[in-house]
Amino acid sequence: MKFVTIGYGDREGYDRTDQAVRDEAHAHDARLLAAGVEMGVAGTPVRVRNPGGTGTEVQEGAFMTSALPIAGFAIVEAESLEEAVRMVAGTPCAVAHGVVEVWPLQSAQG
């Protein structure tokens, strides 16, 4: 199964996390990358709409808001939701006073 993960976190939470914990979290990310997990840091988003097929509208900025900014995304493959949770539990956002959402990615093919 594939899962989309969204990491939320800010510099304040990161900075107040012990350096050894942060170092291990970054090493954990490196191991995930080496295992083939696709991940990246979130850039500046745009919102795209095409209401009723009448024309594309593009606006700068995120549609959703949260208490913490989005820090990054990953696509992970795991046998279960529980395994996916274990995979992201050691990432920087999870350990540095942020949060990681794990979304099961269901096929758009029906």
Image (cartoon, rainbow, N blue to C red):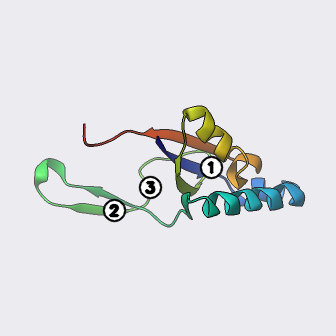
Q: Measured along the vertical axis of the image, is residue 30 above or below residue 84?
A: below
- Horizontal side, residue 35 vs residue 55: left or right: right
Quadrant of the image for the C terminus? Answer: top left
Which residue is at 72% across, 55% downward? Answer: 92
Q: Amino acid at mark 2?
A: Gln
Q: Position of residue 11 (x, y in %)?
A: 73, 60
Q: Quadrant location of residue 73?
A: bottom right
Q: In this figure, which residue is indicated by the disc labeled 2?
A: 59
Mark yes or no: residue 97 visible: no
Which residue is at 76% across, 61% downward? Answer: 27
Residue in front for this viewpoint, 1 or 67:
1
Residue in front for this viewpoint, 85 or 12:
85
Disc ID at residue 62: 3
Q: Position of residue 94 (x, y in %)?
A: 70, 46
- Horizontal side, residue 15 vs residue 1: left or right: right
Q: In this figure, which residue is indicated by the disc labeled 1?
A: 68
**In the rendered structure, which disc, 3 or 1, sits on the residue that comes first in sequence?**
3
- Horizontal side, residue 63 vs residue 73: left or right: left
Disc ID at residue 94: none
For the image, the number of numbered tags is 3
Label 2 crowd (10 A; few <14 / some 14-19 / many >=20): few
Residue at far bottom of view:
43
Mark 2 falls on what kind of element?
strand
Q: Amino acid at mark 3?
A: Ala
Mark 3 falls on what kind of element?
loop
Q: Position of residue 84 (x, y in %)?
A: 59, 41
Which residue is at 76% across, 56% downward? Answer: 25
Q: Amino acid at mark 1?
A: Leu
